[in-house]
Image (cartoon, grey):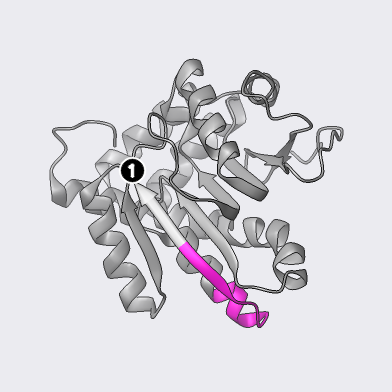
Amino acid sequence: MDDPSLGASEHLSALTGLARLNRVAGVSSMLWREMRPLAQRIDHPLRVLDVATGSADIPVGLASLAKRDSVRLDLHACDISPTALAESSRRALAAGVTIGLEELNAVTTPIGRRFDVITCSLFLHHLDAEESIALLKNLANATDQLLLVADLRRDKPGLALAWIASRALTGSRVVHVDAIKSVRAAYTPAELRQLSEDAGLAGANVMRIWPRRMLLRWSPAIPRSEPENSTP
C-alpha cells in the first residue's frame, strides 16, 4: 500500500479488502462506542475527522451507527492518496453519506481546523517512531474532545491472524503481503504508550482490543491515566 508504483486497480482492490477486514473486526462499532457518550451530550453535530481514511469505510460506518442512535455527525476525512479519496467519494455517495474530503499528509502538515473527535485507524504501523510522534502531535493539536488511534499490535498471535484473515476475506495480493508486513512493523502497547508520552499526550490510555489490536484514547479536556485493558 505504500508503494508509489502500485497501480490504481490494485490499490482499489486493496482498499476494498481492507474495508472488509475493518468491517469484520468491528472497527467502526468500537470507535462509535467510545465517542457515542460525547455525541449524545453535546448541543451540535459532532465534528469528526478520520485521518488516513483509505476508502472512508470508517466514517461511512460511523454515519450508519449514529443514524441508528439518532445522533448528528459532521463528518470529514483526509488521506494523502488521490486514488483513496476518489474511492472515498464513491463509497460515501453510494451510502448516501456526506463527508468533507481533503488531500492531506497529516504527518508533515498541521490540520487546518479543529474537531471534536479525530480518529485514525491502521496507519501508525506505516510510520517510524519520529513520524508517529509528529502525527500524534498534529492530531492532538486539532482535537477538542477525543482522539482515538486504533492499530495492529505486534505479537505472534497477531501475525498468524493476519495471515489467515487476509486470505480468508480478500483476494487482494497487496493485502496478503501487506497484512504480514504490517503486523511485523506494528508497535506493542508499551511502545505506543511511550510514543504518546513523547508526543505530549498526557494521560493517554492504551487498551488492548479485539482482534489483536490496540486503541489509544486521549482527551485534552479530561486527562486520564488508566491501567491497560487485558482483553486478549
Quick one: label 1, few (<14), some, or many (20+) residues within 10 Å? Answer: some
Magenta range is 64-75
Q: Considering depth in this image, is 168 or 25 the residue closer to the camera? A: 25
Residue type, label 1: Leu
Residue 81 position, x and y percent, is 26, 45
Left or right: residue 5 compared with residue 138 = left
- In the rendered image, residue 169, in percent from the top left (x then y), is placed at 41, 54
Is residue 55 positioned above or below 218 on the image? below
In front: 61, or 145? 145
> Looking at the image, is 199 positioned above or below residue 100?
above
Residue drawn 47% across the image and 42% down it: 164
Vertical placement of residue 140 versus 40, above or below: above
- Total numbered labels: 1
Look at 41% across and 76% down and name the residue there: 97
| 47 on left or right of 7 | right
Q: Residue furthest front?
A: 113
